[in-house]
Image (cartoon, helix red, strand yellow):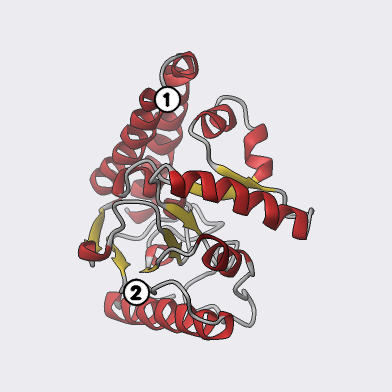
Amino acid sequence: MRMIRSNLFNLLFYVWTVFMVVLFAPALLLPYPVTVWGQRLWARGVNLEMRLSAGIHVEFRGLQHRPRAGAIVAAKHQSAWDTLIWHDVLDDPAMVMKKELLAIPVYGWMCRKTRMIAVDRKAGTKALRAMLEDARAAAAAGRPIVIFPQGTRAAPGASVKDVPYQPGVSALYRGLDVPVVPVALNSGLFWPRRQLMRRPGTIVLEFLEPIPPGLPRKEFDALLQARIEGATSALEAEAGVEK
């Protein structure tokens, strides 16, 4: 039964995504907020499909820490779900993403339209400078900036030695002088990376206490990692799902 429900969700997910891309392609010629609204509708549709077909619910915690203006959201990354939920839970987020994604027809164009922060990971320090410049513009516009500090998905229980934290989040923290809101989640238990199987249960996304600007780099790095990893481990243990 789980396989049937998983395949049903996967089918619905791709059909819905293609439908939304086609439906909102003309939005590229319309005012900016139309595309932002389309991204939010897409995310909400995926959550609905996930609940109805695969039995996966979503719970948000710590919403009192959710940023309302220019701030950095540093989130754990375990699943494809983590890349879409921000369109729903935050107002007009500017997401740090791989530059290669901009090459995807229509989807990449929409990311350009909504001024996502594309990073060429092969460009080294030049990429960090470009990311910081784009992030400053987003923060000045009052947009929350979303970054995955490890730079890629990490399976539940994976060691930070295997998937280390990257310097991008520290560069943003020092360069923007705004609070950083750590985020823990357990999405990889239910929507595992590189798998078609989905597990029923509840994805929990938790906003943690913000880290104020101005801390020394080493202190910031240690505090960010401790908060995210500690809260993520707690959520994974609470779920009681085999990793």
The residue labelled by disc 1 is 32
178 sits left or right of 64 in the view: right
Residue 42, quarter of the rendered image: top left
Q: Nearer the viewer, residue 13 or 33?
A: 33
Q: Nearer the viewer, residue 136 or 91?
A: 136
- Mark 1 is on which residue type? Tyr
Residue 107 percent across, percent down from the top left: 54, 30
Residue 117 percent across, percent down from the top left: 57, 45
Instruction: Write the residue at 50% across / 48% down.
Output: 95
For residue 182, above or below residue 234 = above
**Mark 1 burial class by Cα count in 10 Å: few <14, some 14-19, many 20+:** some
Instruction: Write the residue at 50% across / 80% down.
Output: 220
The answer to the question of whether label 1 and label 2 lie on touching residues, with beta carbons closer than 8 A, is no
Q: Kindly state the secondary structure of the residue where label 1 is placed.
A: helix
For residue 198, above or below residue 24 = below
**Mark 2 burial class by Cα count in 10 Å: few <14, some 14-19, many 20+:** few
55 sits left or right of 94 in the view: left
Q: Kindly state the secondary structure of the residue where label 2 is placed.
A: loop
- Mark 2 is on which residue type? Val
User: Can residue 94 be seen by looking at this rendering?
Assistant: no
Residue 64 percent across, percent down from the top left: 20, 64
